[in-house]
Amino acid sequence: MRPVIKWTLLQRRSSIIWWCAGILFFVFLTLVFYPTIKDQSAQLNKSFDQIPQTARQLFTDTNDLFSPIGYLSSQMFYLMMPLLVGVLAIGQGMSLIGREERDSTIELLLARPISRGRLLLAKAGAGLLIVLLVGALATLFTALMCRLVGLDIATANILMAGAAVILMALNFGAVAYLLSAMGRAGRGAAIGISAVYALGGYILVSLSGSVSWLSWPAKLFPFNYYHSNQLLSGSYNWTNSLYFICVIAGCLLLAWLAFRRRDLLSN
Amino acid sequence: MSEAAISIRGLSKRYGAGRPFALKDLSLDVMPGEVYGFLGPNGAGKSTTIRLLMNFIQPTSGSAHIFGKDIVKDSVSIRQSIGYLSGEVALYPKLTGREFLDYMADLHPPRRTGYVKELSKRFSANLDMKIRDLSKGNRQKIGLLQAFMYKPKALILDEPTSGLDPLMQEEFFILLKETTKAGGCVFVSSHNLAEVQRMCDRVGFIREGELISQQNIAEVAAVAARTFDITFINDVPKKELAAIPGAKVLKTGHMKLTISLRGDLAPLFKVLAGAQVAGISQQEINLEEEFLRFYKKGMP
């Protein structure tokens, strides 16, 4: 298993570096202007209050948009960070097995004494490490930037929020991974279904606060179990994370069932 | 008689219900030390057979064993002893040849260290360039290296010499000989008849998913048409020669004639005894025509 992880990471090193650079730049840009906004927070909050509640919920899960927690939640942890790390995870989920199969290089790997289950697990491990690396780096850099710009939030809470982002992104990636492990039919739908699961879920969960009948279907989506405001204030109930863990484990199990005996695609 | 290294019984593959069989009821044995050529036109079922043996696809029915192990249940353990090369060699374009071989060696360490280096020297393989920058022939060399680097007991090769120059083809044939001499067997698919003639002990002809015939190369050669170039001192007895049963006059020139003859040679020498012959030489037997006869025999 270790060689597959090692060589997958080596082959993807330049893309990992670009992802790290991009996400760090995003964090920097988001936080570097906080000192200028900080002084006008009362005024800005007043303007923000005039936006209808339904629309407001698309940007944040707090009413105080420009307090330290409100700012970090709305500008980063509520949507953008989960979206960025989620896109990375979906990309990895789709390509780890999918690209190898499309390029027929999977035959080289499976011509060695390695079972399909182990290959699937090793590739998932590589994907996990990539998402973990980029997500952790972004979180640590956020914590550092918060200190530098005077955004007063406990570092432990920022790290917890980062961990939840990574978990949720892994959810999206796991769905994409399952679909690509299913072969031709799944691979075609992988990007669409994963995007609906991620973005559609976000919209549904955001609106469920105002539209009561959406609250039940919202329970099916990961955003329902992710509350950036609570995470940053240290009041998050971590039993919510069981949803993420169950979905990831379920997707891996289903991926194995789908992949272990199916015909590999040929060019 | 020793046990077959590769034993296939009633192996069939259908890609979905209602679709025709890509491979139908294939049964054959490949013995240790044997090079078995699998011949057929494109789409005949050669690659399907190879992909079944490698467990890349699942059989619809039937079974196959390699060294007594089931290709489905024991596929991981079987791959300890197999070297495989696919028809369209797919490698990692961003890696150099050396990095790629290191990756493969990490997954399945070669039995003898230094053998990869030795092989790359024999094939004059460029291991320092990125694979995407290599020519088709050089990529094929890397593909062959990864198949041979374990000194496998069985080689399963799909169109192995594609893109190789004649010198490297020769090296490849030598390597095959070394494998079979050590008791290994080779299952090789090809539609290059000259290549099959050069390397195989036995051939199976497949067409539309069905095995039409299996022949020993020596047997094919024994019944093959022989071609003679004959030079005469006087007139060429063309009529008499053309009348010989199984004979076909291929070319006539000034006091020269080329004739191919299938079967008994006595009538030819009888005619030649009555003529004044300056010289006679036999061309190398070309099995290509014989193989084509098998294809045609199977045609509806």
Image (cartoon, helix red, strand yellow):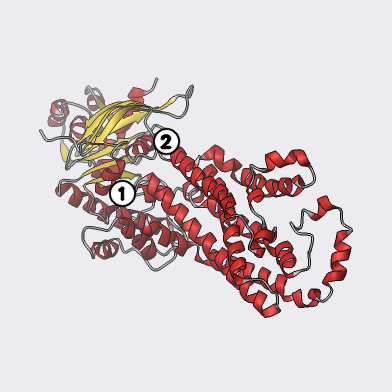
Please rate how many residues cluster around mark 1, counting C-alpha atoms within 10 Å: few if below 14, some from 14 to 19, many from 20: some
Residue visible at 42% across and 67% down in the picture: B129
Residue visible at 48% across and 45% down in the picture: A252
Q: Residue furthest top?
A: B300
- From the viewer's perspective, is A27 left or right of A113? right
- Do circles 1 and 2 both sit on a common chain? no
Place of residue B223 in the rendered image (x, y in percent of width and height, measured from the top left): 20, 29
- Label 2 element class: loop
- From the viewer's perspective, is A227 left or right of B279? right
Could you say which is closer to the camera, residue A10 or residue B93? A10
The residue labelled by disc 1 is A113
| Residue B130 position by quadrant | bottom left
Residue visible at 71% across and 47% down in the picture: A205
Please rate how many residues cluster around mark 2, counting C-alpha atoms within 10 Å: few if below 14, some from 14 to 19, many from 20: few
Q: Is residue A11 visible?
A: yes
- From the viewer's perspective, is B165 left or right of A241? left
Q: Amino acid at mark 2?
A: Asn
- Label 1 element class: loop
Place of residue A85 in the rendered image (x, y in percent of width and height, measured from the top left): 61, 59
User: In the rendered structure, the residue with mark 1 lies on which chain?
Assistant: A
The residue labelled by disc 2 is B42
Q: Amino acid at mark 1?
A: Pro
Q: Residue furthest bottom?
A: A148
Place of residue A140 in the rendered image (x, y in percent of width and height, measured from the top left): 58, 71
